[in-house]
Amino acid sequence: MKKIFSILLITLLASFNGISTVQAADTLEDRLAKELVRLGFEDGKMPPLSKVFGPYQPFVVVDKDIYLTSTAAQRPDGTWMTGLVTAETDLDQLIYATELSVISALNRLKFAADGDLNRIGKIIHVNTLSPAPHDYPHLELLADTSSDMLVRVFGPEIGSHARTILSVTSLPINMHHEIEVRARMK
């Protein structure tokens, strides 16, 4: 009888362990959906892919490398965040713009990877571009925001990357913040 009870107990514990493993599943799609909802995309789905503003491609794929054209901050309502960055610019709004720029980049990466971000094997390099004065004190924070978000979505093995932080005099169409991403497909 003790043997039967022990077997039942082990089986029961193993089934609970299996349930907790299933409940703890954390996929790239789950992490991305959480970020989208947090940023105001109510359904947790990617917004429509925006078009580029000139005679160039939104991305180019060479072998397995994806080179994205810089992406800007597009709000959930489809409007763009614009304006120069100054010492008076609300830092929370600038961080929000940075995160929206990452969403735009992820949207283009998804398109470049035939609709499946799971095909991305590595984020290689990120350039962050802000139209800020040369002495603006928060450029590293903005770059960290981009880097942190890519790591949250892809995980540290795929999402960690090299980067460059650039302060520029202006961005096309008066954009508030942009990022450029280079990635490699599996």
Image: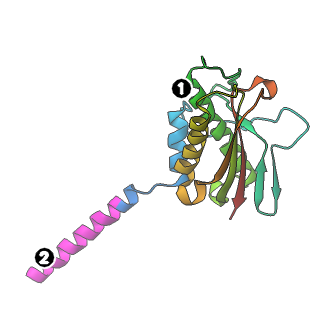
Q: Which mark is residue 92?
A: 1
Distance from the alpha carbon under mark 2 to that under mark 1: 58 Å
Q: Is residue 100 left or right of residue 6?
A: right
Q: Which mark is residue 134?
A: none
**x 84%, y 32%: residue:** 53
| The quarter of the displayed image where residue 167 is located | top right
Which secondary structure, mark 1?
A: helix
Report the magenta residues as a range: 1-20
Q: Residues within 10 Å of mark 2 (few under 14, many from 20)?
A: few
Residue 148 at what x, y percent from top left? 54, 45
| The quarter of the displayed image where residue 170 is located | top right
Q: Which mark is residue 5?
A: 2
Which secondary structure, mark 2?
A: helix
Residue 149 vs 17, above or below: the answer is above
Residue 128 vs 63, above or below: the answer is above
Q: Residues within 10 Å of mark 1 (few under 14, many from 20)?
A: few
Quick one: quadrant of the C terminus?
bottom right
Mark with earlier residue (2, 1) = 2
Q: Amino acid at mark 1?
A: Asp
Q: Is residue 106 left or right of residue 60?
A: left
Residue 20 vs 109, above or below: the answer is below
Q: Amino acid at mark 2?
A: Phe
Quick one: quadrant of the N terminus?
bottom left
Residue 152 in sight from this viewpoint: yes
Q: Is residue 159 left or right of residue 170?
A: left
Overall secondary structure of the magenta section:
helix
| The quarter of the displayed image where residue 105 is located | top right
Q: Nearer the viewer, residue 103 or 15?
A: 103
Query: As drawn, which residue projects farthest toward the top?
Result: 88
In reply to whether residue 34 is colored magenta, the answer given is no
**x 30%, y 65%: residue:** 17
Residue 12 at what x, y percent from top left? 23, 68
